[in-house]
Image: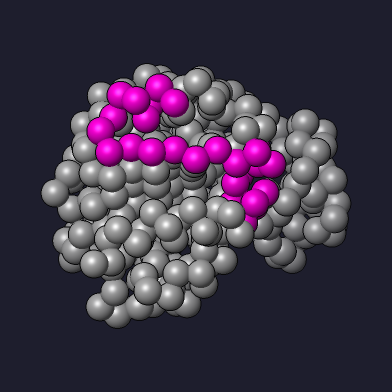
Amino acid sequence: MKRNYYQSAELRLSYLDFEGRDKPILLCLHGHFGNAAMFARLAEKLPDWHVYSLDQRGHGWSQHAESEDYQREDYVRDILTFMDHVLQNKPVVLLGHSLGGVNAYQAAARLKQRVRGLIIEDIGAVIDDDLSFASSIMEPKPTLHALGEGLKAVGIDDDNYFIESAYENEYGWNFRFDKKNIPFSQNYLNGAWWDDFLATDCPALLLHGKLSHVVSDEQIIEMAKKRKHTTYQFFEKSGHTIHDDEPLAFCKAVAAFLKQFQA
């Protein structure tokens, strides 16, 4: 695994290259509060694929943007720039969780000929969520445990997903994500994106946690019915983060879907 950087407009953005010369490419996109390393376990389970994972703007080791620069076209431009300059226009399968899922199908809508398939983890075509709590997260904290405990003050009881983005400096423990501007990013994400979701007909797999508060069973079923070549899989024990809640089942479902592209 190697960490590298590329330039997208005014921002220096980070990505992980899990290496796999001359193998088909899977490009992974995390959700809000996430980072590229969240797909490391999946990459290990896919030895026949060259897996890349982006630290999207405002997350991981990538630079933060101004509040007005977390709009839909900003995220999509970052992906298209990566595909152009780093992947040199090679075809890809896109996998995205939450925010990354919308970014994936919107990027595919703009580069239909270069996206071979889509894997969308627990996000819909219609989104209405509120992440205003993010700007109230207090840091730094003297210990990693205290940083996790501090999330309870904003209603987060399970800190596992967030702690993946923690880091320590001379003042204590902090989060890498842009907590000040994530609420703006979510506001730009809210809306109905049916046109983008339905703009392509490459094979697509929708993964949904039955315990998720982000998207309903009914919307996932509706999305699969409306879009050609689209299937779905429900995970009974998972919430919004299937890759954390049922990691083995998640990796198995992704690997099974990807087999069709290895002929």
Above or below: residue 119 compared with residue 189: below
- Residue drawn at x 62%, y 33% is 210
Picture coordinates of residue 156, whole percent (x, y): 76, 36
Q: Is residue 3 magenta?
A: no
Residue 143 rendering spot, x and y as whole percentages: 84, 59
Q: Is residue 226 magenta?
A: yes
Residue occupying image coordinates x 72% and y 64%? 168
Q: Give 26 or 16, whichever is nearer the viewer.
A: 26
The residue drawn where x is 17% and y is 44% is 112
Q: Is residue 84 left or right of residue 221?
A: left
Query: Can I make out residue 134 in this image?
Result: no
111 and 167: which is toward the camera: 111
Left or right: residue 215 compared with residue 74: right
* Image quarter hosting the C terminus: bottom left
Expressed as whole percent of the image width and height from the top left, the position of residue 152 reads 82, 37
Residue 224 left/right relative to 167: left
Who is closer to the viewer here, 50 or 129? 50
Is residue 257 visible to us here? yes
- First to last magenta residue range: 221-247
* Residue at figure coordinates x 37%, y 19% from the top left: 192
Q: Position of residue 202 (x, y in %)?
A: 23, 44
For this orientation, the residue located farthest to the bottom is: 21
